[in-house]
Amino acid sequence: MIANLNALLAQAPIDTASGQPQIDILQAIVLGIVQGLTEFLPISSSAHLKVVPIALGWGDPGVAYTAVIQLGSIVAVLWYFREDLTKIATGAYKAIVQSDYDSQDFRMALGIGLGTIPIIFFGLLIKVFIKDFDQSPLRSLGAIAIASIVMSLLLAIAEKFGKRQRDFEKLTVRDGILMGLAQSMALIPGVSRSGSTLTAGLFMGLERGAAARFSFLLGIPAITLAGLVELKGALGEGIGQAGLVSLVVGTVSAAVFSYLAIAWLLKFLQTQNTWIFVWYRLAFGTAILCAIAGGALKNI
């Protein structure tokens, strides 16, 4: 752990306009790697994007930067699932034209649409009632650690007792709504959008691979909207050349490693269980709490 964290944070260059640490090219690459590897694994990208740069002495990059580089992740998931998305979109359109509302493609599209509503609704509530979410106690390291531990325990229960009897073709609109509600929990840093939806899918009796695959598809609208909203805000405030370059580099890095993470996880879950993520999240959260208690990390 970092023994002199406060000194390191003091050395991090700060953007006087925004109050956020300036991000150089190397840091942007690393943050993109962290975003890419953790966005689709059930371990929370927001938690790692908060903890890793602070532990390295770079400071918290902030909600806006991390949301923008998520656009790299959305490019990756759109490309990886381009055939699935094309099939669902064309199938849903044909179903509407033919009034075939029992079509699997229509039900899939409807499930994704309805499943996106909860995270938009609660996200807007946060925007309205929590003006300075960047500095909210929900984004503190202690809160992230607790969320990680709680979610590790829920994933363990789901892995232990989930029936895993339904494959991707047996998904229903109800699955989309319930997983959408679970996805809204990811507004709390440390919960993990992928982790909450995968856990919900296992509780609902889905096979691991099916739950992960639908989790990725369900996350497309949510990640896209978050990234575009924050990008608009960042551009509106005026980004200098260095800031724009760091955003581009971080986004490209996130795209590459997101694609690799998606491909790996889907292949992994075909033959393996989720216990590795349970133990990782438990260890991650416990390590943060121990570091805070020992003074190696400040609960910011």
Image (cartoon, rainbow, N blue to C red):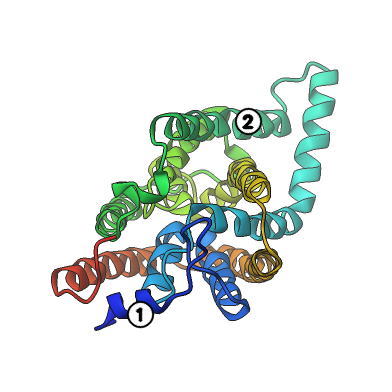
x and y, in percent, of residue 199 in the image: 40, 49
As drawn, the residue found furthest toward the left would be 293
Residue 236 quadrant: top right
Label 2 or label 1, whichever comes before in sequence order: 1
Q: Which mark is residue 8?
A: 1
Residue 160 quadrant: bottom left
x and y, in percent, of residue 93 in the image: 82, 28
* Residue displayed at 14% across by 75% down: 294
Above or below residue 197? Residue 276 is: below
Q: Residues within 10 Å of mark 1 (few under 14, many from 20)?
A: some
Can residue 273 be seen in the rendering of this structure? no
Name the residue nearer the viewer: 204 or 184.
Answer: 184
Residue 44 quadrant: bottom left
Quadrant in which the N terminus is drawn: bottom left
x and y, in percent, of residue 170 in the image: 59, 38
Task: Identify the residue under disc 2.
Answer: 113
As drawn, the residue found furthest toward the front would be 16
* Residue displayed at 27% across by 64% down: 285
- Mark 2 element type: helix
x and y, in percent, of residue 276 in the image: 37, 70
* Residue displayed at 58% across by 27% down: 114
Quadrant in which the C terminus is drawn: bottom left
Q: Which mark is residue 73?
A: none
The amino acid pointed to by label 1 is Leu
